[in-house]
Image: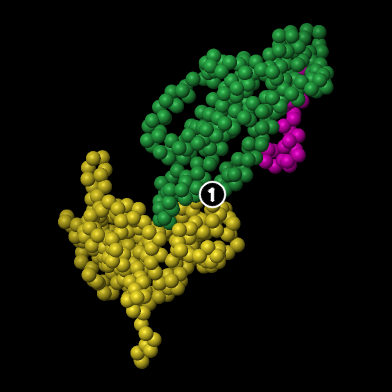
Chain colours: A green, B yellow
Amino acid sequence: MSARSLSRGQRIAIGFVAPVILIALWQWRAGSGNAVIGMAPPSALFNALGEVLRNGTLLADASATLTRTFVGFFIGASLGTAIGIATALFPLLNRIIGPALHALRQVPMIGWLPLIALWFGSGEGAERIVVCVAAFFPAMLNSHAGAAGVERRFLDVGRVYGLDRLQRLRFIQLPAALPLVMTGLTQSLAFAWIGTIGGEILMGANAGLGVTMQQAQMQQRLDIVLVAVATTAALGFGINLILQHLRRTLLRWQPVLP
Amino acid sequence: MSTDPLPRPSVSAGQQNFRGELVISNLSKSFSIGGENRKVLDGINLSVRPGEFVSIVGASGCGKSTLLRLIVGLDDDYQGEIRLDGSRIATTSLDRGIIFQDHRLFPWMTLRQNIELALRNTDVPKAQRARIVERHIALVGLTGFEDAYPHQLSGGMAQRGAIARALVTEPKLLLLDEPLGALDALTRVNVQKELQRIWMAQRSTMVMVTHDVEEALYLGDRVIVMSPHPGRIRRIVEVDLPHPRDRRSSLLHRLKDEILEELTATPNGNGEPAKLLRLPARDVH
C-alpha cells in the first residue's frame, strides 16, 4: 500500500504512530527499576507541563522565543533576500560586496556569539542580532542564485515585448527567482530558530524556551527541560507548516513533481 | 472590371502601403567560437513583400534561427542591412513578433496574463485589452483555458497560446522559428491549418524557419532553401498555388521531392549542388 492511497485523516494519524511508540517505550523503561539517569517518565512530564502552564512561564517563554525568531528572521531574511537579488542584478555590486559576504558566510553561527556578545552585550538586542545573522545568509545565497539564474529565453521574450527594466524585474526576474527565494526563506527560518534557541541557552535572557532549558538544567529539573524541548519541537514544526503552505500558495504555478 | 471608385489610401495612410516589407541586403554574421571567427551567415539578400509568407528550410547549422534573431532585433551585431519598411533594424520593436520553437509562455502566469503582458507597452487602450486577449484566445481555440498555467496545458495547446501571444500585438512582421517542431504529427497538421487560417485573416508578413519541407511548401508563398557552413541562400522557390492549399496537391509533392533532393545532394567541392534542378514552378531571383 502506498502512502498516496491513504485519506488525509489516515495520513495524519499515521504520523502519530512513531511518537506514540516512542513515548510508550520511554514510559516502560523509566518505570522499570533500572531507569537511566537523566530520564524522567512521560507521566512526570505531564505534571511539569501542568505546572509551567499554570504559573505562566511556558506561555511567556514561548512568546519571547517566537518574537525573537520572527523579528530576527524578518530583518535578516529581508536583508538577505534584497542583497541576494541586488547582487544578481548588478554585477558591479556583486564584485564589490560578494567576496566579503562569501568569506563571512564561512563563519559558523556559533562563531558569531562571542563577537556579538562583546559588541552588544547580552541583552535582547544582541539576541536579535544573532538571529538576524543566522537568517541572513541562507536567504542571500538562494535568492542570488534564483535571480542570477533566470533563463535567457525568458528575458528574450521580455525584450521582444519591449519591457523596461522595472517591468522586466516585476514580470520576469522576481517571479522566476521566487522558487529559490522561498527555499532560502525556509532555510533562513530554520537557521533563525536554531539561532534563537542557541542564543538563549548560551547568552541568557529574561525569558525564552532556551533560557528555561538552561535554568532547569542547573536546577536538575529534567522534566522541565523536556517540556521545553517538546514545546520547541512542536512550535518549530508548526512554523514550518505555515511556511510550506505559503510556499505552495505562491508557487501554485509550478508543476507538481511526481 | 471597373476601376475602384473609392479613393485609394494615399501616402498619408502610408502604413497600409508599406506594411511589413522586409529587405535584407548583403547580410553576414559571424560568431567567435573558441577565439576563432566563424561565419554563420554569408551574403544573404532577400526581399519579402508585405503580407507574404516566406518559409526557410535548410539543414541544421545553416543559420536560419540566427537569421530570425537578427530580424527580430535580439542581436544587432551583424554586417549588411536589414530594413523593415525602410528603417534599419537595430533592436526589438513591437512591430515585429516572434514565435519560438519552445512556447516560452512564462510558467508563473496564466494563459491570459501571458497574452496580456504582450499588450502592456502597446498603445491599445486599456479598456479594450481584455476583449482583444479573449478574442485571440478564441482564435487559437483555447477558450476555457484562460486561467490555466502553462504546465496545465499540453504541448500543442501551449504552442497555440504562444501563437496567440505573438499575434495579439498585430505585428507587421511575424517570425516563426520552427514553431511546430516540438509537436506530434497530428497536432502539427492541425496547428498548420490554424496558422494558415490566421495568416489569411491577418495578412501580416510572416517568415517561418522549419526543417519540414512539406510544412514549408504548404504554408509558404516562397520557400528559401539554405545551405550550411556558412549559411547561404541556395535557391528560392516560388510556390504558385492559392491559399488555402490542399496538402495532397501534386505540385506540392513534386516540389517537396526536388527540394529534398537539393538539400541532401552532396556538394561537388565548391558548394554547388551536384545536380541542377528542373523546378516546375517559377524560380525567382
Residue B150 vertical placement versus B243 (above, below): above
Quadrant housing residue A34: top right
- The residue nearer to you, when weighing B18 against B63, is B18
Q: Is residue B51 magenta?
A: no
**Picture coordinates of residue B242 (x, y %)?**
38, 77
* Numbered range of the magenta stretch: A1-28
Q: Give neighbour class at mark 1: few <14, some 14-19, many 20+ (Cα, 10 Å).
A: many
Label 1 is found on which chain of the structure? B
- Whether A15 is among the magenta residues is yes
Residue A164 image position (x, y, % from top left): 43, 51
- The correct choice, above or below, for B181 with respect to A20 in the image is below
| A67 relative position to B228: left or right | right
Q: Nearer the viewer, residue B189 or B35?
A: B35
Please say if A239 is above or below A152. Answer: above
Residue A158 in picture, x, y percent from top left: 43, 52
Q: Which residue is mark 1?
A: B108
Observer able to see residue A145:
no
